[in-house]
Image: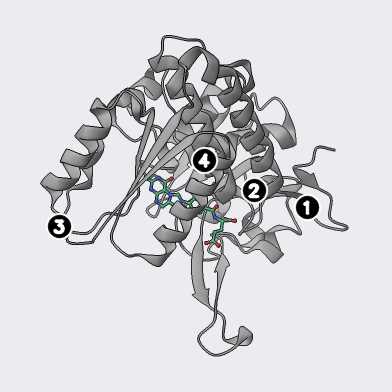
Amino acid sequence: MSDAIKSVDGAASLLDGKAAAALIDSRAQAGVEALSGPLGRAPCLAVVLVGEDPASHVYVRNKVKRTEASGMRSIEIKKPADLSEDALVAIVEDLNADPGVDGILVQMPLPDHIDSRRVIETIDPDKDVDGLTAASAGRLVQGAPGLRPCTPSGCVWLAREALGDLSGLHVVVIGRSILVGKPAGLLFLEQNCTVTLAHSRTKDLPGLCASADILVAAVGRPEMVKGEWIKPGATVLDVGINRIDAPERGEGKTRLVGDVNFEQAAQKAAFITPVPGGVGPMTIGFLLVNTVRAAAARAGLDYPAAVADL
Ligand SMILES: Nc1nc(=O)c2c([nH]1)NC[C@@H]1CN(c3ccc(C(=O)N[C@@H](CCC(=O)O)C(=O)O)cc3)C=[N+]21
């Protein structure tokens, strides 16, 4: 059994995203080592954070730590919440123009007075390590080479680790966001799956989920998916990260839960990701991989072998 799969008695096997992400990080690190010679420098990821949202600061700190641990150069740009949209666009344009920067990530969500679409569309598609620009989305739809969104890439990797070939399996994705749901559908389609994109208006969601060989929950509603919705033996990938009150832990305490009721679903599924420690850590792993890929592609080089086959 791979490091990423932990067997649990009498219930589903745990898909350990933390262990899997360590493997993905080490692939990125090997890619950095292979590329630094030909490039004459290390690949470089720039992260832009606007505002004081504490959760965003935690994610960004994690990204910076893992970027540096992989041997890459990290640039961190932090600005106050009242930064103007034009000023943010100018920061992105500067990063586009800097030949030493390979990847640009603008942390979402942005403050309400900033048009996120305009900022994202400013990012050079060749540096779009989030895979969020229209150009990246178009490349994904067309099956052309390009940078793929990180969270859905992590989902596909975990599913393949658990199941091997995914051909013909029915994947139900709950959620149709640009960041996760839609690209997840396309990436599983690329794996020859039969894909259903479900959402808040879907009729009989429990009945639909019961036909899913792979269920991807990406709606942002704490523990919405119940045990009875799960087909026995299914693989459950929980993308949700919801912070809820946990009075049992003491006054004012919170805990993280996914979009899936884990206790219930683990009784039915064959494989399931926990929250935390599931899909979340994989997202950062693929961000590092995308940065290595972007650095190679921008220099006109093939992807290093370590990150070519993920
Ligand atoms: N441009 C952009 N790209 C993103 O990819 C992006 C973003 N904006 N904005 C916010 C979301 C969220 N996100 C996470 C990444 C890692 C964890 C992660 O590793 N979570 C840990 C727990 C962390 C905790 O304790 O809060 C886990 O699930 O085990 C979570 C969430 C990336 N996002």
Q: Residue at x 42, y 9 (%)?
A: 300
Residue designated by label 4: 67
Spatial separation of the CA atoms under disc 1 and disc 2: 10 Å
Q: Are discs 1 and 3 less than 8 Å apart at CB?
A: no
Q: Is residue 50 above or below residue 24?
A: below
Under circle 4, the secondary element is helix
Which of pointers 4 and 3 indicates the residue nearer the eye? 4
Q: Is residue 245 visible?
A: yes
- Which circle's residue, 1 or 3, is located before the other in the chain? 1
Q: CA distance from mark 4 to mark 3?
A: 30 Å
Q: Which residue is mark 1?
A: 12
Residue type at mark 3 is His
Check mark 1 vs ligand 1: CB closer than 8 Å? yes or no: no
Marks 2/4: CA distance? 28 Å
- Report the residue marked by disc 2: 236
- Where does the image place residue 95, in percent across and percent down from the top left? 27, 33
Q: Please tell me which residue lies in front, 215 or 255.
A: 255
- Marks 2 and 3 sit apart, C-alpha to C-alpha, by 37 Å
Please state which of residues 287 and 268 is positioned toward the viewer in this rendering: 287
Q: Which mark is residue 113?
A: 3
Circle nearer the N terminus (4, 3): 4
- Residue 244 in the image: state x and y as whole percent: 50, 74
Q: Residues within 10 Å of mark 3 (few under 14, many from 20)?
A: few
The residue tagged with tag 1: helix, strand or loop?
Answer: loop
Residue 117 sits in quarter: top left
